[in-house]
Image (spheres, rainbow, N blue to C red):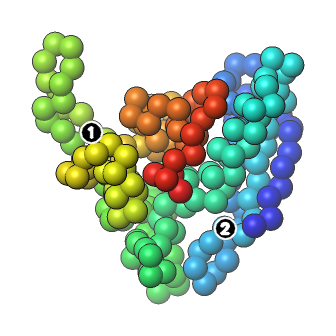
Amino acid sequence: MILYVSAVVAGSCGGGSGSTSTIAFATTCQMESALDRPIAGSVNFCPSAITDKVTDDFIIATAKHEIIHALAFSPSLYPFWRDQNGKPRTDRDSNGYPPRGSGYYNYMWSDSTIKQVTYNDWQVYKGSVSHTVNLVVTPTVVAEAARYFDCSSLVGVELENQGGQGTQLSHWEKRILGNEVMTGIIDSNPTLSNITL
């Protein structure tokens, strides 16, 4: 993969106003046609977020996080994920593309990749509520998470449901995976787990 790295006020940086908490952002620029693998991507570090208070370890963790977004962990790439045999997880049209999405998402993924589940008995402080989540349900993610949490009945791993377009569905749910490098808030010394790999 060719990776273009910049540090300019652009996109999600908030115009240099300091009104955003975005540290960096990434995207895939080009995918090869045979297996939909990203072959070019970009990472931009927001200059206002890089201060003398930021440690080298934090910058390295942020770089890893953003590279993973450019490689695979992004709603724009979920529709292009493939199974262990190289077959698309999401059905394709005659031109080789997944179904068109709406709004923010150009293409939509299948339920064999990301599945929306509603729990009608979600326990909260004052009883139970209905709670809808999006789960990554690919076999490798489910197997690694089941092993990690010692839970053989695990259905999938929850994606973040808060934080707007730059965070929602683009990261693991923070309350579940804590300091994993692909949660929406990077902590000190984040872990890159087999769930992400």
Whole-number angstrom distance, CA of label 1 to CA of label 2: 31 Å
* Residue neighbourhood size for the residue with mark 1, other residues' Cα within 10 Å, grouped as few (<14), some (14–19), many (≥20): few
Q: Which mark is residue 132?
A: 1
State the residue lying farthest toward the top.
126
Q: What kind of element bears circle 1?
A: strand
Nearest the eye: 11 or 115: 115
Q: Is residue 119 visible?
A: yes
Q: Earlier in the sequence, mark 1 or mark 2?
A: 2
Q: Is residue 115 left or right of residue 56?
A: left
- Looking at the image, which residue is at 21% across and 42% down? 118
In this rendering, the label closer to the viewer, 1 or 2: 2
Q: Is residue 168 left or right of residue 176?
A: right
The amino acid type, in three-letter code, at marker 1 is Thr
Q: Is residue 155 left or right of residue 183?
A: left
Q: Residue 35 location in percent, x, y?
A: 58, 79
Quick check: 32 above or below 137? below
Q: Residue 19 location in percent, x, y?
A: 70, 19
The amino acid type, in three-letter code, at marker 2 is Pro
Q: What kind of element bears circle 2?
A: strand
Quick check: 154 above or below 111? above
- Looking at the image, which residue is at 64% across and 59% down? 71
Q: Which residue is mark 2?
A: 38
Quadrant in the picture for the N terminus: bottom right
Q: Is residue 134 visible?
A: no
Q: Residue 105 location in percent, x, y?
A: 51, 54
Q: Residue 4 location in percent, x, y?
A: 83, 55
- Looking at the image, which residue is at 46% across and 51% down? 195
Q: Quadrant of residue 124?
A: top left
- Looking at the image, which residue is at 68% across and 30% down? 22
Nearest the eye: 50 or 192: 192
